[in-house]
Image (cartoon, rainbow, N blue to C red):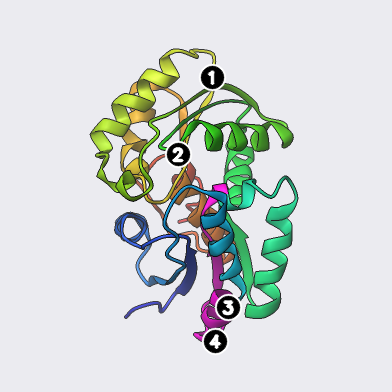
Amino acid sequence: MFGWRARIGYISPSVIEVLAYEFYRFAPDGVGLVSSACAIENWTNDGFEKGLAQVKESAAYLGSRKVDYIIHGGGPLVVMRGKGFEETIIKEIETVSGVGATTGVRSAVEALRHMNANRIVMASCYPPEHNDAMAAYFKAFGFDVVGLEGTNMPFKEIQNQTPQEIYRFARRVASRSPDCDTIYLPCPQWQGAQAVRALEEDTGKTVIAYTHANFFCAFKALNIGAPVRGHGKLLASLARD
């Protein structure tokens, strides 16, 4: 039965396609996804503000649908407001929805800390300015970003890069910083989560994808400890059975 264990709300800045596909590849039985989309159009700050303006309404609606937890997606939207805004938006979501919440940036930070990450390589689909902003955000939380590169994909074409292409790209980026301990793959519309296992096996590094980090935090908050195997070290670390 759908959602018998938990129903997780997700506020997407864009369409909901890759994230839902990847979620149901690793979600334990009985954990369902309940989504709301803000449908922003591009990488611009105006587009990001449009998405942020819809968050309270989306969160209130998801709360009315009796979800158990809410994730706010879209790292660049939060990063553009500066360190600390992740806590502001989480508080707003929790207030109007009545349930616990996280956002992509805080999930990434929590996942990186959980895996004892220190020296991070970030391989992304972002344009240079959003890569730089995200790297600065991680540095503000105490991480050493030793490698950074993006494929600079047009906003509505992010989903077109295959997991195989992402794997090859991320491996090249990591190879330029052999002293890194962790590879981070941001963006829920990028098919990075599907490349995690192969990257970990072939590089020997911890690999954290955006979507895995978000739901790691949700599963942890909801005390879901069912085994999640075959999708990398981060999700596997939740297993209690």
Residue at 43% across, 51% down: 42
Separation (CA) of disc 1 from disc 3: 40 Å
Q: Is residue 224 left or right of residue 3?
A: right
Separation (CA) of disc 2 from disc 3: 35 Å
Q: Considering only order in the chain, which callout, 3 or 1, is on the residue closer to the N terminus?
A: 3
Q: Considering only order in the chain, which callout, 1 or 4, is on the residue closer to the N terminus?
A: 4
Residue 235 counted in the magenta span: no
Q: Nearer the viewer, mark 4 or mark 1?
A: 4
Question: Contact (CB < 8 A) between labels 4 and 2?
Answer: no
- Amino acid at dot 1: Cys
Separation (CA) of disc 4 from disc 2: 34 Å
Residue at 45% across, 37% down: 126
- 85 over 123 or under it: above or below: below
Residue 74: image location, x then y, percent: 52, 53
- Numbered circle sitting on residue 240: none
Few, some or many residues within 10 Å of mark 2 (<14, 14–19, 20+):
some
At numbered mark 4, what does the secondary structure look like: helix, strand or loop? helix
Q: Considering only order in the chain, which callout, 3 or 4, is on the residue closer to the N terminus?
A: 3
What residue is disc 4 on?
A: 64
What residue is disc 2 on?
A: 233
At numbered mark 2, what does the secondary structure look like: helix, strand or loop? helix
- Numbered circle sitting on residue 57: 3
- Numbered circle sitting on residue 180: 1
